[in-house]
Amino acid sequence: MRRYVHAGCRGRDAGAPAGVTDLKAAIRYIRYCDDVVAGDSESIFVFGMSGGGAQSAIVGATGDSELYDPYLKAIGAVQGVSDAVLGSMDWCPITNLDTADAAYEWMMGATRSNLSDDEQAISDSLAKAYASYINSAGFTDENGNALTLTESSDGIYQSGTYYDYIKSVIEESLNNFLSDTTFPYTASSSKGGMGGGPSGGGMPSGEKPDGAPSGDPPSGSKPDGGNSAEDATSIEDADQITRNDTSSSGVSTSGTYETAQDYIDALNANGEWITYDASTNKATITSVEAFVKACKNASKNLGAFDQLDAGQGENTLFGYGDENGAHFDSTLSSILTELKSEYASSYSEDLSKTDSVGYTADQRVKMYTPLYYLLKSQGGYGTSNVAKYWRIRTGINQGDTALSTEVNLALALENYEGVKDVDFETVWGQGHTEAERTGDSTTNFIEWVNSCMK
């Protein structure tokens, strides 16, 4: 028997880790009531999109972590019961915030314009800091080869095995799209190739499929009205994240494309960066930077997550339960201090604060960083019960995070002992949504859960 439980949790304005703490308390209570609640309390799956995807990933990685104990005790959560889960479904997870600003500038900083000299120095320093992080993190590919970044003549650290891996993920996403799509193909009017799903069918509707049992979970609320490109922004209208209009940047795809080559030509409208072989139906790209400029422009201000004026949604998340946001990125703080920036003092001040249980922002960020628990190079490795099954999906065109957010999560999980399966894909032509290559998100999620239980 499958049972859907909608556990309420506090929002970001309550401050991290309140939301995840509440979810852990709910999981503990379900297990505590195992003898009276239907279903298997040892086979709990969590799911979410965007910030919810982040919380799903965090819950999946932090099972029984002692870092949460003071918060769980403070709200009266059941003690002596596990809060670990069996599986985690994450759509576009906004997570690993310790390196998110640096990753954003490394991948998408090249699309910024009109930065002042001081702002450009911050962006460049963040990109270099990301290379330092990657080279010390210990990522490896499926064959055990180390993934690292090296200095390059063009761009900032746009070379090395890690760079090549990111480039291959982009190419795989495009080639999956070409394989899935029947031409002629009709794309919705949108930027960066965001023209809907396979065969012009649009993105997943988010509605529960016909005939699904009433207890099955909803996929997450997409407004009524079909699958136009405008629907893709529904979560962006509600999540209180600050974004910029990138409608004048990148390439645009709309209308009907008779052949795959016609579609590729549209993506190459501002200069050729994709080479297509019709005989094999395969495409290659010239560089990550070319992809980003065409399809994945930066949509957030400098300090994409820890904004310089502390005005971003994640600043609210790391506030202290009031209306004021707080800085939390220690890497960015160090860069600002080194550059003698006017913002340095506000970062230093916020990073020195403690919350109601005496935790600093650094400690709270670790609790919201799955990689802190998954990488051997991090202090939290081996201190939690990590979910055995993972499914991660992201729209490759989204400007909310660097692609490396989801890629790094998948890489770490694939190398974590005890994780049985990692089902990871990026979806071409889709943005910040419940991205799926084919079908709808609800049906795919349910089928994945069922497959894990066989």
Image (spheres, grey):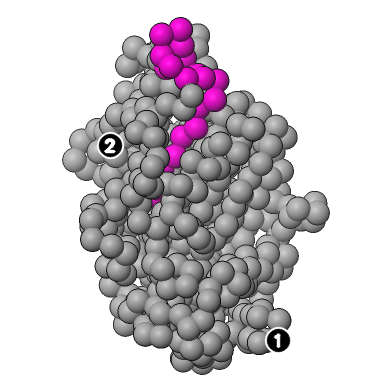
Q: Is residue 313 visible?
A: no
Q: Amino acid at mark 2?
A: Gly
Query: Residue 427 appears at what percent x and percent y?
Result: 51, 63
For mark 1, what is the residue?
279
Main secondary structure along the magenta-highlighted residues: loop
Q: Nearer the viewer, residue 87 or 242?
A: 87
> Residue 12, percent across and down?
29, 39
**Label 2 crowding class (10 Å Cα cut-off): few <14, some 14-19, many 20+?**
some
Spot occupied by residue 306 in the image (x, y as percentages of width and height): 37, 52
Sequence-first tag of 2 and 1 = 2
Q: Quadrant of the C terminus?
A: top right
Seen in the picture, residue 263 relative to 177 is either above or below; the reply is below
- Magenta span: 30-50
- Inspect the magenta stretch and tell me whether residue 40 lies in it: yes
Residue at the extreme left: 323
Q: Nearer the viewer, residue 168 or 341?
A: 168
Do the CB atoms of the residues marked 2 and 1 lie less than 8 Å apart?
no
10 Å neighbourhood of mark 1: few (<14), some, or many (≥20)? few
Q: Quadrant of residue 248?
A: bottom left
Q: Is residue 451 visible?
A: yes
Compared to residue 271, the image places residue 48 above or below, namely above
Q: Residue 3's image quarter?
A: top left
Query: Is 168 placed above or below 23 here?
Result: below
Residue type highlighted by circle 1: Ser
Q: Which numbered circle lies on residue 11?
A: 2
**Secondary element type, mark 2:** loop
Q: Residue at x 23, y 61 (%)?
A: 225
Q: Residue at x 26, y 58 (%)?
A: 234
